[in-house]
Image (tube, grey):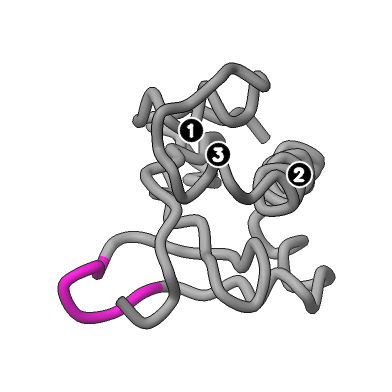
Amino acid sequence: MDIHFNNQLLIDLYEGNKVNDKEFRSNPNLIKQFIKTVNKLRSVAKVEELYQYAGLNYEKLKGNLKGYSSVRINIQYRLIFEEVASNTEPFEVILFKLEEISKHYQ
């Protein structure tokens, strides 16, 4: 699956660049888990394959985040992304637009 980062912080975390955000600077384990999660997203050919990874807890979001999906990075953090479908039939998801890392219940 193709991945597009909509946030410079996510690009920097994935590429191993220094970040100013204290929350991530002080948590190298979170960065490793984030990279591992993104690599899992890259490895799938279809969205349905995300259900095979039980630890990801893939879900479509509701409420004010309707239209987005998420996977777990760890028990505390999740990666929120948008699924972009192709313009032609079959209308399959061809791209994940990574939006942000958030604490699950904040």
Residue in the picture at 77% in, 75% down: 55
What is the quadrant of residue 68 in the picture?
Answer: bottom left
Residue in the picture at 16% in, 72% down: 64
Left or right: 84 as drawn, with respect to 76: left
Residue under label 2: 32
- Residue nearer the viewer, 86 or 103: 103
How many numbered marks, from 0 up?
A: 3
Question: Between tags 3 and 2, which lies in front?
Answer: 3
The residues bearing labels 2 and 1 have C-alpha atoms spaced at a distance of 12 Å
What segment carries the magenta color?
61-66
What is the quadrant of residue 43 in the picture?
Answer: top right
Left or right: 57 as drawn, with respect to 85: right
Task: Indicate whether residue 54 is drawn in magenta.
Answer: no
Residue under label 1: 10
Percent of width and height locating residue 76? 56, 75
Task: Indicate whether residue 64 is drawn in magenta.
Answer: yes
Which of marks 2 and 3 precedes in the sequence? 3
Tell me the amino acid under the disc marked 1. Leu
- Residue nearer the viewer, 103 or 4: 103
Dot 1: within a 10 Å radius of its alpha carbon, few (fewer than 14), some, or many (20 or more) residues?
many
Percent of width and height locating residue 106? 30, 76
Question: Between tags 1 and 3, which lies in front?
Answer: 3
Percent of width and height locating residue 12? 53, 22
The residues bearing labels 3 and 2 have C-alpha atoms spaced at a distance of 12 Å
The disc at residue 25 is: 3
Residue in the picture at 72% in, 63% down: 50
- Residue nearer the viewer, 55 or 91: 55
Percent of width and height locating residue 20? 40, 29
49 shown above or below 63: above
